[in-house]
Amino acid sequence: MHVLGIDIGGSGMKAAPVDLTTGTLLSDRHRIPTPQPPRPDSMTEVVGQLTQHFDWDGPVGVCFPARIKKGVARTAANISDDWIGVNLEERFSTASGCPVTVLNDADAAGVAEMEYGAGQGRRDLVLMLTFGTGIGSALFWDEELIPNTELGHLRFTDDRTAEEFASDRIREAEDLAWDVWGQRVRRVLQYLDFLLTPDLIIIGGGVSRPHRYERFAPELTDLDTEIVPAELENEAGIIGAAYAAVHSAMAGKGR
Ligand code: BGC
């Protein structure tokens, strides 16, 4: 089965058709820069352009940097607050003329890893964390998503949340050496391990690429949980969103 996956972020909106049998893209991604300011009307137009680009007439899965409940955005990260309260599924369906399912971006990346990547076959408690502008999280029990966990927003120090302490954006902004940043990541993982006792933690986002992961992985020692890098890197959001569009348990739906 083929589904169009769309990954919406604060700087780019990317789409590609996905083959759900193999979990691979059927063609190159098409990327359009996110309109600035990143408001609902202009971004919705881009969703229409992306579906038109692929001449798409079938199911569409979208991932979005927000908590999503029954298709409605409850928050907005790195996009306009005007998105809060908007029914994304209705809006994007109208703009594209296709049935659309929307889920949180980290949840989508986690879904992709569970189905096709580092979490395949794991029925125990799996925590996926994406390190980028923020820290996204996705939690799975018995191969089912517990959606919208937002663990990057845990208050971590007196004045910082986990993502304000250890996101990849903070590594760059504070010009942290990889090992120093890796020690921060380790502290976040230790805390999450204490709170949740997961069986596996998957580290996702751009830092999961081998040439980056190997630079901070040596700091992730003495943790009780198995830690592995994500396998699908940049494409995880598109692939997971596409998968969730036709597997409702992975879209956190129906509850
Ligand atoms: C947002 C999450 C999102 C994550 C990654 C966080 O700041 O609150 O919803 O999944 O960033 O984009």
Image (cartoon, grey):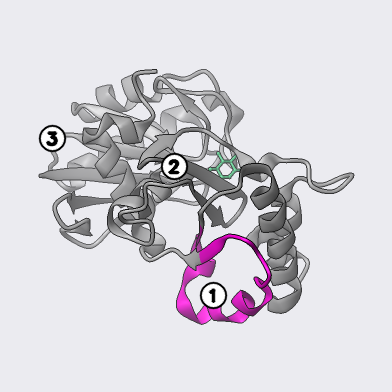
Q: Which residue is mark 1?
A: 213
Name the residue: 13% across, 35% down.
58
Q: Does residue 35 appear in the picture of this structure?
A: no
Q: Which residue is mark 2?
A: 140
Q: Which mark is residue 176?
A: none
Q: Which residue is mark 3?
A: 58
Amino acid tagged 2: Phe
Name the residue: 55% across, 49% down.
198
Query: Is residue 83 shown above or below 217?
Result: above
Between residues 211 and 197, which one lies in front from this camera angle?
Answer: 197
Q: Name the element at disc 3.
A: loop
**Magenta stretch encompasses residue 118:** no
User: For the residue with label 1, is its CB less than 8 Å from the closest atom of ligand 1?
Assistant: no
Nearer the observer, disc 2 or disc 1? 2
Ligand 1 falls in quadrant: top right
Q: Name the element at disc 1.
A: helix
* Image quarter in which the N terminus is found: top left
* Image quarter in which the C terminus is found: top left
Q: Are marks 2 and 1 in contact (CB under 8 Å)?
A: no
Q: Does residue 133 appear in the picture of this structure?
A: yes
**Magenta stretch encompasses residue 221:** yes
- Structural crowding at the residue carrying mark 1, measured as other residues with C-alpha within 10 Å and reported as few (<14), some (14–19) or many (≥20): some
Taking 10 as reference, is 158 left or right?
A: right
User: For the residue with label 3, is its CB less than 8 Å from the closest atom of ligand 1?
Assistant: no
Amino acid tagged 1: Tyr
- Structural crowding at the residue carrying mark 2, measured as other residues with C-alpha within 10 Å and reported as few (<14), some (14–19) or many (≥20): many
Distance from Cα at disc 2 to Cα at disc 1: 23 Å
Q: Which residues are magenta?
A: 201-227
Distance from Cα at disc 2 to Cα at disc 3: 28 Å
Q: Name the element at disc 2.
A: strand
- Structural crowding at the residue carrying mark 3, measured as other residues with C-alpha within 10 Å and reported as few (<14), some (14–19) or many (≥20): some
